[in-house]
Every structure is written in C-alpha cells, then in structure tokens.
C-alpha cells in the first residue's frame, strides 16, 4: 500500500488534491478549482509569461512581466514591462495579446480604475504616472510625481488615487479628475514606501516598505498610527475584501506576515518558501495567493486556518498576483 501511494504521488499533477484516510488514498481534482472562486493571474518575470488559474494556463508575454491588474468585468488584464517602459494588454479569458502601450522609464506598479476605463502606470525612473485609455489603448495623460512612484491604489469611487513614492517623500494623493497630485502625506518611519492597500472603510492606508515594516497611515489626520514588523525585504500587501486581515510578503525571507486589520497586531507569520512577493486574496476572502519568487511556485493559503493548502510550480520568478474581484 505504501509503494502504491508513493507511485500515485509521483504521477499526479500539482493541481490534484490527495486525501489519505485509514491507509486509503483518494484523488480529487475538484479541490484545486475550489480554491479559485474567480480567476487569478500571476506575472512570471524571468520567463516573460503570465500564468492564469485555475488550471495553470500559461500565456506568452513581453520582457520582464512584472505588475498586473485585471478590469472589474474580468475581461482585460494589463501587465507592466519595466524593461520596455510599456504595458501589455491581454484578453483575460484567452490570453491573446490585444496590444502594447508605451509609457515611460521603468514602468512598475499599475492599477486599473474602478470603472475599468483607465490604467495608471507608475514609471519609477521617470517620476511620473502614465494614464492609459484602455478602450483606445493609448496614453492620454502624464501625472508628474515626486521621486520614484512605485504603485497605485484607487478609492472605490475612483475619485482619488494614492501612489507610493519610494524615493522617500511619502504617499502621493491624486485627484483623478484633474489628474494632478494634490498633496503628499509624509510617512515618518516608512522611509521607502513600496506597495500599499486601503482598509475596507478607506480610512487607513497599509504601506509596505522595502525593508521589513508595514506602516499604518491615518489618511484623515495624515499621521502614522503604528509601524509593524514584517519579514525581510520588499513585498506586496493586501487587505482581504472583507476587511479583516492584512497580508504582506517578504522577498528576502520565507514568511507571509498576517496582520489583524482591526487590532493592528501581527497575528502570525506563515512559512511559504523563499521570496514571497505578490499577495492577493480571493474575492470571497477565503484564500490567499502568494508568488514565491526564489522557489518558482505559487502557494495558496487558507485564510481561516492560516496555513498553506496548495502549491503550484511555475516557470521562472513569479512576481505579482491579480485577482478578479479584489482590485
């Protein structure tokens, strides 16, 4: 029986769930799909590809596929290519490339507006943001920023966008109607704002730096409420859609840090493999998807048990995760 089980383990794919009860091995493919209530997309930086789940469909992309974002209707995926200073636009169902748009130097973090009409692309080496009209696939505006804009997060009504200024200025506040930075909120203690997300009520910004910290910024007062310790290195950060938990990776470490969004306390660090960077929860907040850069895999965390329940091997350097239903 033991040899049979080992042979089965060696033959099945990483999308298959194995349950061993009283010495009997049963195989179910349903479990793998059940952890993806909506499609998830992972950029693969070194293989110039994109992986779509469930089912791990691999699409060919452009050089150094980095940050990605999916439209609210789930029809279009956009991925940045910092090497080219451009974005790639894909049909989110088929993976067909619909076009590319030139932005500016070192296109990094990007986000699609809540109405699905525009994408804001942070051009880190040009100190600006390119606004791209997705329907016409062309750049329509440039928003000048302080040094090293890295990533963007819109408010749900789309009237405001926040941009992390990794050069040290803090958090930029953008009026999306005028397409201008109206102010910069300093983030003392968070010297290199890298990625961000907002609390469910949009009163707090959770800001991940490039070392090992998460700053909690009160957006009304402009004050840092708390600084929390996370794993080493820069990473993505995500507030679950239900607003209960905050997750952040650690590209120079092997843990995902879990923060209670209400108490602002670290509740656990989950071992996931070396180099977790992108983190994004499913639209129902039930699962978290993490790109493990050094180990070339995507792991799925059960957000109730706070433990890894699935692993998917991928090509070189999975970097960022986009999920339909969790912008």
Image (tube, rainbow, N blue to C red):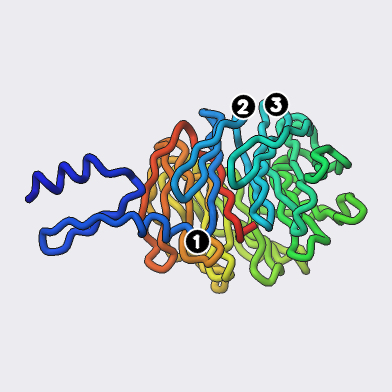
Q: Which is nearer the eye, 202 or 10?
A: 10
Which corner quadrant holds the C terminus?
Answer: bottom right
Mark 3–mark 2 CB contact (< 8 Å): yes
Left/right of residue 240 with respect to residue 202 in the rendered view? left
Quadrant for residue 33, please give it: bottom left
| Residue lying furthest left | 1
* SS at circle 1: loop
Q: Earlier in the sequence, mark 1 or mark 2?
A: 1
Residue bearing mark 3: 84
Q: Could you say where residue 204 lies in the image, as x and y percent from the top left?
A: 68, 66
Residue at 18%, 59% in the rendered image: 20
- Distance between the alpha carbons at the discs numbered 3 and 2: 7 Å
* SS at circle 2: loop
Q: Could you say where residue 130 lies in the image, as x and y percent from the top left?
A: 81, 40
How crowded is the residue under tag 2: few (<14 C-alpha within 10 Å), some, or many (20+)?
A: some
Residue bearing mark 2: 63
Residue bearing mark 1: 37
- Distance between the alpha carbons at the discs numbered 1 and 2: 30 Å
């Amino acid at each position: 029986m033991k040899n049979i089980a080992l042979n089965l383990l060696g033959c099945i794919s990483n999308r298959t769930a194995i349950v061993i009860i009283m010495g009997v091995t049963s195989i179910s493919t349903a479990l793998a799909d059940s952890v993806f209530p909506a499609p998830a997309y992972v950029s693969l930086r070194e293989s110039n590809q994109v992986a779509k789940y469930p089912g791990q469909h691999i699409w060919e992309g452009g050089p150094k596929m980095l940050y990605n974002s999916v439209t609210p209707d789930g029809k279009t995926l956009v991925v940045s290519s910092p090497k080219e200073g451009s974005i790639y636009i894909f049909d989110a169902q088929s993976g067909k490339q619909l076009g590319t748009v030139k932005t500016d130097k070192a296109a990094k973090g990007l986000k699609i507006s809540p109405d699905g009409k525009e994408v804001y692309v942070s051009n880190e080496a040009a100190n600006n943001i390119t606004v791209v009209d997705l329907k016409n696939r062309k750049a329509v505006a440039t928003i000048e920023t302080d040094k090293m804009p890295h990533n963007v997060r819109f408010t749900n009504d789309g009237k405001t966008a926040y941009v992390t200024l990794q050069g040290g200025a803090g958090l930029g506040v953008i009026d999306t109607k005028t397409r201008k930075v109206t102010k910069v909120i300093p983030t003392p203690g968070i010297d290199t704002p890298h990625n961000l997300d907002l609390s469910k009520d949009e009163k707090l910004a959770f800001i991940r730096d490039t070392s090992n910290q998460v700053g909690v910024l009160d957006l009304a007062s402009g004050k840092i409420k708390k600084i929390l310790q996370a794993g080493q290195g820069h990473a993505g950060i995500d507030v679950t859609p239900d607003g209960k938990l905050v997750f952040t990776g650690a590209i120079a470490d092997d843990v995902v840090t879990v923060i209670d969004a209400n108490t602002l306390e670290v509740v656990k660090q989950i071992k996931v493999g070396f180099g977790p960077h992108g983190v994004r929860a499913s639209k129902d907040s039930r699962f978290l998807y993490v790109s493990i850069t050094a180990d070339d895999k995507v792991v799925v965390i059960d957000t109730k048990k706070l433990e890894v329940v699935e692993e998917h091997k991928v090509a070189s350097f999975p970097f960022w995760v986009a999920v339909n239903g969790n912008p």
